[in-house]
């Protein structure tokens, strides 16, 4: 940490659970192994019917109620649960870290995030995210997730999320922003919205190419990352069925509510992108180019223009 940090920052780990008994203890143990030990855990359980609450209660007894708080989630899905626990935790720490129930954190995950965020001023929304190592249900290594090579920015966030929520750590200014902007909107995913609204409002995103999480892949994953050819072909089929356009429609409506929060340049980008979705060729392609909206690779950006050609964005 830099010299300006006169008080050791506290991190609130925001864990969302639902029937997670199979892997929850391994995740909790990875918190305890963190090199940065000034953390508290707030677990929001969404109506689990297995031993999840029992496991959390056992760790609460072991660590103390000052270290682990258990609350009831809203029972409206994982994205709503993360928004819920973020509202609850607001103001209880200096930094906040979202967590899934079935991953394993590397011991330096929190400390590394704090180090990389240490230059972000307290009044600027700051968000840390990065790659993960995909592992099987029995914790065998599969592969790394995509490496983002272009700088994080709103023009990228509009159509692509580069960091999973299970990697994200954010400061109090970002927590305030998230708490204030998730009340009136529909969320596709909490992490994509975080990337979008933090960059859109002039915040700073730090992307870490070094994985800090072993991201477990199994049938229970709501959002995984399968890099195989069949998975990519499936996503292409879904794009042309209109799923991507539906997601963008949700984001456009959400950003319209908070348009005044965006920076002047990002309002310009957003307005052009919104117009792009309503125009036909060639006007939509010209507007898309003027907006400078892009994905992380040339090929995927080319795919974006191909989708625009068929009005699928």
Image (spheres, rainbow, N blue to C red):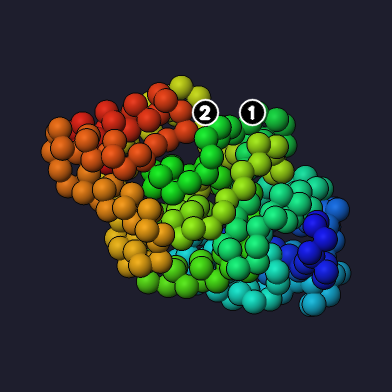
Find residue 34 and report its horizontal and vertical position in percent. 83, 54
Q: CA distance from mark 2 to mark 1?
A: 9 Å
Q: Which label belongs to residue 227?
A: 2
Front residue of 224 and 219: 224
Q: Residue at x 79, y 72 (%)?
A: 67
Find residue 72 and report its horizontal and vertical position in percent. 58, 74
Please determine whether, in this image, residue 29 is positioned above or below residue 106: below
Find residue 94 and report its horizontal and vertical position in percent. 70, 69
Tag 2: Cα neighbours inside 10 Å, few (<14), some, or many (≥20)?
Answer: few
Residues at discs 2 and 1 in contact (Cβ within 8 Å):
yes
Q: Residue at x 27, y 53 (%)?
A: 271
Please determine whether, in this image, residue 163 is positioned above or below residue 39: above
307 left or right of 42 in image: left
Front residue of 229 and 52: 229
The residue that mark 1 highlights is 143
27 left or right of 80 in image: right
144 left or right of 199 in image: right
Residue 56 in view in this figure: no
Quadrant assignment for the C terminus: top left
Q: Which sits earlier in the primary sequence, circle 2 or circle 1? A: 1
Front residue of 79 and 96: 96
Q: Residue 25's image quarter?
A: bottom right
Q: Residue at x 33, y 28 (%)?
A: 303
Please determine whether, in this image, residue 88 is positioned above or below residue 113: below
Tag 1: Cα neighbours inside 10 Å, few (<14), some, or many (≥20)?
Answer: few
Residue 79 in view in this figure: yes
Q: Residue 53's image quarter?
A: bottom right
Quadrant assignment for the N terminus: bottom right
Find residue 272 and report its horizontal and vertical position in percent. 26, 48
């Amino acid at each position: 940490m830099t010299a300006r940090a006169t008080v050791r920052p506290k991190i609130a780990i925001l864990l969302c659970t639902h029937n997670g008994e199979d892997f929850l203890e391994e995740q909790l143990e990875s918190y305890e192994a963190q090199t940065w030990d000034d953390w508290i855990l707030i677990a929001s359980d969404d109506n689990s019917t297995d031993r999840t609450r029992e496991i959390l209660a056992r760790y609460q007894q072991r660590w103390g109620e000052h270290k682990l708080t258990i609350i009831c989630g809203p029972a409206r899905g994982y994205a709503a649960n993360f928004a819920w626990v973020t509202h609850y935790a607001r103001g209880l720490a200096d930094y906040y870290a979202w967590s899934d129930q079935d991953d394993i954190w590397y011991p330096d995950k929190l400390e590394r995030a704090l180090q990389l965020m240490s230059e972000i001023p307290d009044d600027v929304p700051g968000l840390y995210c990065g790659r993960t190592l995909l592992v099987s249900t029995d914790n065998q290594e599969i592969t790394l997730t995509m490496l983002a090579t272009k700088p994080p920015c709103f023009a990228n966030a509009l159509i692509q999320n580069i960091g999973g929520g299970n990697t994200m750590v954010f400061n109090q200014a970002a927590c305030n922003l998230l708490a204030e902007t998730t009340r009136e909107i529909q969320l596709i995913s909490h992490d994509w919205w975080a990337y979008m609204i933090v960059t859109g409002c002039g915040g700073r995103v730090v992307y870490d190419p070094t994985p800090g999480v072993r991201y477990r892949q199994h049938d229970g994953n709501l959002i995984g990352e399968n890099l195989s050819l069949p998975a990519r072909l499936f996503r292409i089929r879904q794009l042309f069925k209109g799923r991507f356009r539906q997601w963008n429609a949700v984001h456009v409506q959400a950003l319209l509510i908070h348009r005044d929060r965006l920076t002047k340049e990002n309002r310009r980008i957003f307005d052009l992108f919104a117009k792009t979705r309503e125009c036909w060729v060639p006007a939509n392609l010209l507007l898309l180019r003027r907006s400078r909206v892009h994905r992380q690779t040339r090929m995927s950006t080319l795919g974006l223009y191909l989708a625009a050609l068929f009005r699928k964005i």
